[in-house]
Image (cartoon, rainbow, N blue to C red):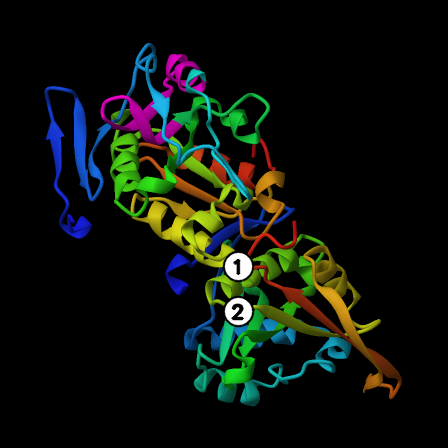
Amino acid sequence: MTDVSQRDNSRDDEKGAITVETPKGPVLIYSQCMPGFFSDLRLDAGLGHFSHYSSIIQKLEVFEKIAAGKDGRVSLGLVDDKVVVAYGVGYYPDSTERWSKLGDLMYEVAAIEVSRHYRSMKIADVMLSEMVNDELFADKILYMNGFSWHWDLDGKGLTMAQYRKMMMNFFKTHGFQENYTNEPNIALREENLFMVRIGPKVSPEDQQRFRNLRFGIVNR
Amino acid sequence: MLEHYPKEIVIKDGTPVLIRPATKEDEQALNEFFARIPQDERWFLRDDLADPVDLRRWIEQLDYNKVMPLVAVNQQDGAIIAEVRLHRRLARCLRHVAHLRIGVDPAYRNQRLGTWMLIDVIKLAMDLGLDKLLAEFVQEAEEAAIHAARRLDFFEHAIIRDYCKDVKGNYHDLLIMVKTLHSDWCDF
């Protein structure tokens, strides 16, 4: 059994992927998958429908659509080069969302999920690190919505409060901070999380606009 | 738990406010805050922190394990404009419960400031692993706080009739409200 705390994350330059050694064998992380990458893949059984919990993305076509969108990001963790055991996706907010009022300043880390069979192996850590450390985001505000109704409490064996704390600590290590907002979906339940990472080139004026928009104040 | 502070909010009129734990350095600002609370409201304070001597004693003995005080600071002038306290019990049978007290500067009411303070203290209570939050309110004297608590799923658990007296000697009921901090999906 491999000691996961001493796992070897080496970059496999030939395939453009990072290898994460896990007790279940190597998982290859492809951090920026292009359209067309997703044919012939399949989702691991640890991603899907469970009682009290369903994966956010359950169809490969969704990855294709995101990757084809403007600055869309799809990061995958693959086993045997064809089984998706983890994914992370990011894109600009939809025009129906509050954050779209700031245009391309805002960018959502929309989902990051690891199969129930591959958790606690630092896969999400490597994926998020690869995803956010991108020059594209230097002048953007990255954000994540942590909606508690998506959390796999049964799968992790955690309470809601423990899961929330785990999420906070996880994103915090990647430069995110919890921010308060009255955005209705976040405000719906107090355990929900809204975490933000402000790029080093985001101007003070844009930070001010974002701060106001968090509380529904536009153009001040 | 405190590494996530300060937290920034913007209240309805656009004033930027920081929420953070109170420290010993806040004594003067807290004195000024409590001095702005109207006399008839101060009457109902469980701890008379409007008295500078009592406030000094309280702040010198501040122990976050027993009382976690959070203050809201107006970023434009540095004034404390609201405070909320989480009173914890050290007895093993009551460690899962905390009582809360809240106060908002009259000039900043109806700005959702009290609601944000309650939201923050609820999140803090979750992070501390508490199961229940309990708040006592004097009916007719603390209606705004009761309303804000109701909106955040504090439920009325008991009313003690004619428990408190106001400054004129009239009796008021004491309302005990409890919020359960759900740990799983049973509430869905």
- Residue B177 at what x, y percent from top left? 72, 70
Q: Does B28 appear above or below B71?
A: below
Q: Residue at x 45, y 23 (%)?
A: A92
Q: Quadrant of residue A182?
A: top right
Subunit under mark 2: B
Amino acid at circle 1: Lys
Question: What residue is disc 2 on?
Answer: B130
| Magenta stretch in the rendered image | A62-89
Could you tell whether A118 is left or right of B47 in the image? left
Q: Position of residue A198 (x, y in %)?
A: 36, 38
User: Which quadrant of the figure has residue B147?
Assistant: bottom right
A82 inside magenta stretch = yes
Residue receiving disc 1: B123
**Residue A184 relative to residue A35: left or right:** right
Secondary element at image label 2: loop
On screen, residue A117 above or below A41: below
